[in-house]
Amino acid sequence: MRGMIEAALGLLVAGAALVFRFAGSDREVEVQLWHYVTYTGAAFLAIGLVRDMILILKRGRTEKPRHAGEKLICFESVSGALLVMAGMALYLVGVERAWHPDLSWLGVYAGGLFVVSGQTKDVVMVFKREKDHANLIPW
């Protein structure tokens, strides 16, 4: 059941984009590399924010017990923020790489982002302070 709402929305968006494509009213657009990277990260952040706001409004805040010293952060938020920063860095450095996809394929890409977001929504990264961490195996 994990990610069912996001998967349904993703399939709906991708399906609508494909209908648009096969209806014959598609056109080409120019998209720079930094657009792909930045907007992918922004989409992950926006989808996660909307999901979290719905959960907070529905259930209220719930604090789960944590071990002392542990910090938790959502993988989707970290990857979204890193993608936005990488996209902005590409823009500031002046990387010029353009693609010319059909508009409908961008809709399919957006639908795929919903599906990926739904699959990673429960992945949480744990940070904690560990003395003598050289003895820890990294996996």
Image: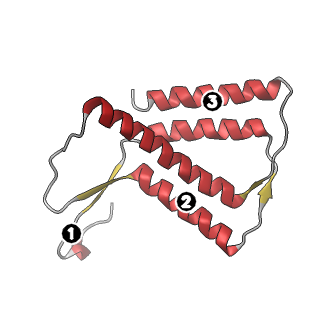
Question: Is 91 drawn above or below residue 111 in the view shown?
Answer: below
Q: Indicate the quadrant where residue 126 lies.
A: bottom left
Question: Residue type at mark 2?
Answer: Val
The residue wearing badge 2 is 84
Mark positioned earlier in the residue sequence (1 or 2): 2
Residue 16, position in %: x, y? 69, 26
Q: Residue 55 appears at what percent x and percent y?
A: 33, 34
Q: Which residue is mark 3?
A: 13
What amino acid type should be assigned to the residue bearing mark 3? Val
Q: Which mark is residue 129?
A: 1
Q: SS of the residue at dot 3?
A: helix
| Dot 3 and dot 2 residues touching (CB under 8 Å) | no
Depth order, front residue of 19/61 = 61
For the point 43% across and 52% down, which residue is it?
77
Residue 19: x and y in percent read 75, 23
The residues bearing labels 1 and 2 have C-alpha atoms spaced at a distance of: 28 Å
Q: CA distance from mark 3 to mark 2?
A: 22 Å
Choose the circle earlier in sequence order: 3 or 2: 3
Q: Residue at x 77, y 67 (%)?
A: 96
Which residue sits at x=50%, y=61%?
A: 82
Screen quadrant of the C terminus = bottom left
**Counting residues from the N terminus, which is met first, the one under dot 3 or under dot 1?**
3
What is the secondary structure assignment of the residue under circle 2?
A: helix
Q: Work out whether 84 lies above or below 102.
A: below
Q: Is residue 62 left or right of residue 86?
A: left
The reply to whether residue 120 is visible in this rendering is no
